[in-house]
Image: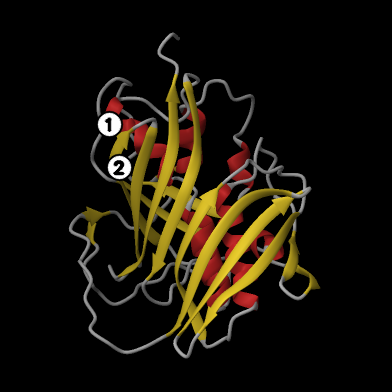
Amino acid sequence: MASLGRQPVVRLAKLTVVTEVFKNLMQLESVSDNYYVAPASPEKGERTFGGQLLAHTLRAAQISVDSGKSVHSSHSYFLQPGRVDAPTDLFVETVRDGRSFSVRQVTACQSGVELFRSLISFQIREKGLDWAPDFPREVPEPNKQIRSYYEFWEAESPQLQGPWHGRDRPIDILYINPPDQPQGLPITEPQLMWIRVNEGLQGDRGLNEAALAYIADATLIDHVLLPHGFRWQDGRLTGASLDHSMWIHCDVDADDWLLYEQSVETTRGSRGLARGRFFDRRGLLVATCMQEGLIRWDFRQ
């Protein structure tokens, strides 16, 4: 076990993946001022992956903002499920442009139906008081001995016929402490994963910010059933993401491994709230997010 204290960066070998699924996914077609079309999903699930909507709306907002400003927060609502085989229309509204901050509202639609809405704030980087907590636990370095999140999902989903469609996302996820205990036992410890976009982004700040938004939705809401001894893949559950907020604290390389620590804050009123924190390999907190999901449980089954 290696401590994740603030230490000099030790990078893994550079990525050798030759596909550019994520970068192609972020290629938006400009139709007119503040109107863009985003490509369809690379996966074949039942609904559009929430991380794709987060990344697409952020990418559209970036185009309309001075390049000297970086995103520092986003607050988003999932309104309707989207079709994975259809492009998405993105409409950007300028809410504010100041010397230090800019704010954009972006709506994502398919066939005239609004799927998603996000309010995104940008800031010119400034020097100031810096403090962040050290991650207090010891975790293993990312390696092939750590179980893949996709393997865990498929093992917990006996209804699947073949591999889970989530494997088609351009994301690598290593699950450090999957909940392997029998169902029915409450699990309240934080869930720990190494995660990254699995293609090189060559230090492009905007693409890295969009990639961070993309991967943030990959696993976070799955854990809200763990304190009850259940799993998100359970057929008795009707669930969906409701909203998502993210704060990016500094520049980040989303194509290098990030430790994603995820915890459940509360479940109540048929909703569950989860918190996520991203640490880079030096142990520096680079981003924080919160996500709420719908939990409707059929106790008759």
- Which residue carries the number 2 mark? 264
Residue 30 location in percent, x, y?
78, 71
Residue 84 location in percent, x, y?
71, 44
Furthest residue toward right? 31
Q: Closer to the camera, 236 or 76? A: 76
Q: Which mark is residue 227?
A: 1
Q: Are marks 2 and 1 in contact (CB under 8 Å)?
A: yes
The C terminus: image quadrant: top left
**Earlier along the polypeptide chain: callout 2 or callout 1?**
1
Q: CA distance from mark 2 to mark 1?
A: 8 Å
Could you tell me which residue is drawn at 46 percent across and 27 percent down?
156
Q: Is residue 17 visible?
A: no
Callout 1, which amino acid? Pro
The N terminus: image quadrant: bottom left
Q: Which mark is residue 274?
A: none
- Place residue 189 in its image quadrant: top left
Q: Closer to the camera, 12 or 31? A: 31
Q: Is residue 62 visible?
A: yes
Furthest residue toward front? 95
Callout 1 secondary element: helix
- Place residue 181 in its image quadrant: top left
Could you tell me which residue is drawn at 24 percent across and 80 percent down?
130
Residue 294 location in percent, x, y?
45, 35
| Vertical order, 155 against 257 (above or below) | above
